[in-house]
Image (cartoon, helix red, strand yellow):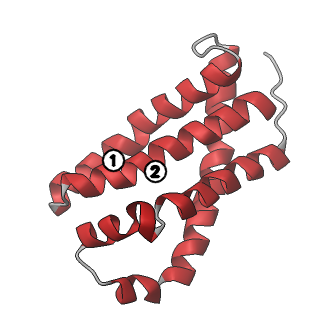
C-alpha cells in the first residue's frame, strides 16, 4: 500500500482560505444581506452571535480541509480523480455534492428554508470546497 504524505501546514492553509473566502461571500455588499434576509432575522441579531460563529466557521473549515485532503489524495492515488488542479476542483465538487449539498437540501425541505438560502449557503460551500480541493491537490 502506498504511503500518503500530507503537509498539515497546507491543510491548515486550505482551511483558512475557505474561512477568509467566507468573509468575502457573506459580506453585506455581496450575499450577506440577502442571506440574513432568508434566515428571517435582523442584522443586529446576527451580530450577537458573530464571535462564536466565526470561531465555529474557522474550526469547521480546518476540520473539513483535514478530511478533504485524504479524500482527494486517495481519489488521485486510486485514479478516480486526475492529478493536479483539475483533480482538486473535481474532488471538491464531488464531495460537496455527495455530502454537503445533500444534507443542506434536507434542511431546505425539513425546515422549509427558501431556495435562495440554499443557493447562497451552498454557493459558498461549493466554491470553498473547490478552493480547498485545488490547494490540497496542488500543495499538500
What element does badge 2 sit on?
A: helix
The quarter of the picture where the C terminus appears is top right
Q: Residue at x 83, y 23 (%)?
A: 3
Residue 41, image quadrant = bottom left
User: Pointer 2: what residue?
Assistant: 124
User: Pointer 1: what residue?
Assistant: 103
Q: Say left or right for 109 vs 140.
A: left
Q: Which numbered mark, 1 or 2, is in the foreground of this view?
A: 2
Q: Nearer the viewer, residue 26 or 87?
A: 26
Q: Say left or right for 14 vs 131.
A: right
* Other-residue count near label 1 (Cα within 10 Å), few / some / many at <14 / 14–19 / ≥20: few
Q: Which mark, residue 48?
A: none
In the depicted structure, whether residue 85 falls above or below residue 17: above
| Residue 65 appears anywhere in the view | yes
Contact between marks 1 and 2 (CB within 8 A): the answer is: no
| C-alpha span from label 1 to label 2 | 15 Å
Q: Residue furthest front?
A: 29
Horizontal and vertical percent position of residue 34 = 30, 65
Horizontal and vertical percent position of residue 56 = 56, 70
Q: Say left or right for 55 vs 100.
A: right
Q: Nearer the viewer, residue 72 or 84?
A: 84
Q: Residue at x 50, y 42 (%)?
A: 127
Amino acid at each position: 500500500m502506498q504511503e500518503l504524505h500530507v503537509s498539515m501546514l497546507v491543510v491548515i492553509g486550505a482551511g483558512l482560505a475557505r474561512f477568509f473566502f467566507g468573509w468575502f461571500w457573506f459580506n453585506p455588499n455581496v450575499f450577506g444581506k440577502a442571506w440574513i434576509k432568508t434566515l428571517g432575522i435582523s442584522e443586529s441579531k446576527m451580530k450577537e452571535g458573530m464571535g462564536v460563529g466565526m470561531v465555529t466557521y474557522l474550526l469547521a473549515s480546518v476540520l473539513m480541509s483535514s478530511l478533504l485532503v485524504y479524500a482527494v489524495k486517495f481519489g488521485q492515488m486510486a485514479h478516480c480523480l486526475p492529478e493536479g488542479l483539475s483533480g482538486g476542483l473535481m474532488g471538491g465538487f464531488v464531495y460537496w455534492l455527495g455530502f454537503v449539498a445533500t444534507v443542506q437540501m434536507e434542511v431546505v425541505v425539513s425546515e422549509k428554508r427558501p431556495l435562495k438560502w440554499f443557493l447562497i449557503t451552498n454557493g459558498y460551500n461549493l466554491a470553498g470546497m473547490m478552493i480547498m480541493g485545488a490547494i490540497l491537490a496542488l500543495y499538500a
